[in-house]
Image (spheres, rainbow, N blue to C red):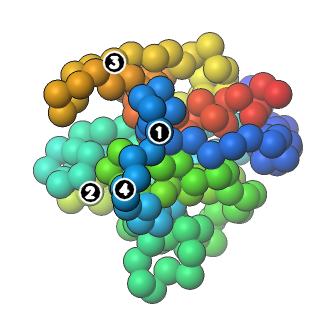
Amino acid sequence: MLQAAEVRERLRRALDVPAGATSDFDQNGSVPAGLEARPAGVLAAFHEDGRLLLTKRASGLRHHPGQIALPGGKVDPGDADEIAAALREAREEVGLEPSAVEVLGVLPAHRTVTGFAMTPVLAMIRGPFTPVPEAGEVEEAFTVPFAHVADPANYRLERRLWRGGWRSYHVAPWGPYYIWGATARVLLALAKRLSA
């Protein structure tokens, strides 16, 4: 089993690996001209044993219902930046208090097909934490082992018909959870940095 110091060190080293920004368009051409880039922050929060906290979004949400996601969302007017947005959203979505989070750094923003520039915030959860999902936003909170997240071999490309054309996207299924799209692409970018 991983120890907190090892997880923290591996994540810090990953932040030092040079890598470009990613987007939902990496396998599908370039980011369309004029697509919005609304700022957002997502929290990639690891428990001390390396497990990554993920959520399954509520099925009644307007954006990304039922999808697996990192806690987070758009930057609101009261947020100082993407880190503040990620911390606020994690508190709202799963009850993770900002004081229980050690922010290690950020990865380059990921451009989404829905018009967000999503900044992944790498962090460690201090001490024990039991998520309390916000019923209106989160159907379930769960964790994925570090070994699954950190291994690029666990990611693959799939494709589906979307808005009249074929669209390729990354997936990294874990048990009953279908991790795909922007979440899988961000985690793949992290996995590549961890393997460098």
Q: Residues within 10 Å of mark 1 (few under 14, many from 20)?
A: few
The residue at the far left in this view is 60
Q: Which mark is residue 35?
A: 4
Residue where numbered disc 1 is placed: 30
- Name the element at disc 2: loop
How far apart, in angstroms, are the residues tagged by discs 1 and 2? Answer: 31 Å
Q: Kindly report the distance in space between the C-alpha atoms of the residues bearing marks 3 and 4.
A: 22 Å
Q: Earlier in the sequence, mark 1 or mark 4?
A: 1
Disc 2 designates what residue?
Answer: 137
Amino acid type of disc 3?
Arg
**Three-letter amino acid code at disc 1?**
Ser
Amino acid type at mark 2: Glu
Q: Is residue 63 left or right of residue 150?
A: left
Q: Quadrant of the N terminus?
A: top right
Q: How far is the residue under mark 1 from the one under mark 3?
A: 17 Å
Nearer the camera: disc 1 or disc 3: 1
Taking the spot 66% from the left edge, 21% from the top edge, the residue there is 151
Instruction: Decide which of tag 3 and tag 4 comes sooner along the chain.
Output: 4
Kind of element beneath mark 3: strand
Question: Does dot 1 land on a helix, a strand or a loop?
Answer: loop
The quarter in which the C terminus is drawn is top right
Q: Amino acid at mark 4?
A: Leu
Which residue was labeled with disc 3?
Answer: 159
Instruction: Work out whether 110 lies above or below 50.
Output: below
Q: Which mark is residue 133?
A: none
Residue contact at pointers 2 and 4, CB within 8 angstroms: no
x%, y% of residue 80? Answer: 56, 81
Q: Residue 120: percent from the left, percent from the top?
A: 58, 52
